[in-house]
């Protein structure tokens, strides 16, 4: 099940590869900004998008190696 999810996210990465690095960097910057500004309490949306975009990027890198 998780291999199928990673394969699907790999396809999503290959279709829109140019979007995910920018989403990752911008959402990381927003999460760090909220963490510093709000005394150690980051908001959930930027953290979620940073983790999701990192998962999509890593799935795109790993997915060709899942099927031998």
Image (spheres, grey):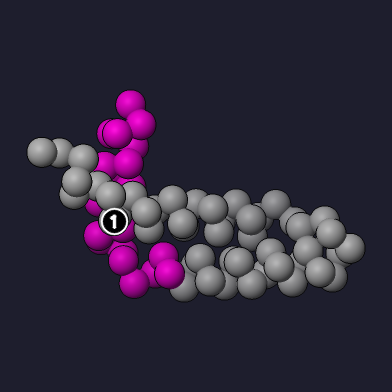
**Does the magenta run of residues contain 19?**
yes
Residue 43 pos. (x, y %): 75, 56
Q: Residue furthest top?
A: 1
Q: Residue furthest left?
A: 68
Question: Residue, x 69% and y 64% (percent of image)?
Answer: 31
Question: Residue, x 86% and y 64% (percent of image)?
Answer: 38
Q: Residue furthest right?
A: 39
Residue 9 pos. (x, y %): 33, 47
In magenta, the rendered stretch is 1-21
Left or right of 29: which side holds 41?
A: right
**Residue labelled with disc 1:** 61
Residue 48 pos. (x, y %): 60, 52
| 36 is higher (above) or lower (below) than 15 | below
Q: Secondary structure at mark 1?
A: helix
Left or right of 35: which side holds 56?
A: left
Quadrant of residue 7 within the rendered picture:
top left
Q: Dominant secondary structure of the magenta stretch?
A: helix
Question: Residue, x 44% and y 51% (percent of image)?
Answer: 55
The answer to whether residue 12 is visible is no
Residue 25 pos. (x, y %): 53, 71
């Amino acid at each position: 099940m998780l291999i199928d999810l990673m394969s699907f996210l790999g396809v999503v990465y290959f279709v829109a590869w140019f979007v995910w690095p920018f989403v990752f960097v911008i959402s990381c910057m927003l999460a760090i900004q909220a963490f510093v500004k709000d005394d150690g309490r980051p908001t959930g949306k930027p953290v979620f998008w940073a983790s999701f975009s990192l998962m999509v990027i890593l799935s795109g890198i790993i997915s060709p190696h899942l099927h031998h």
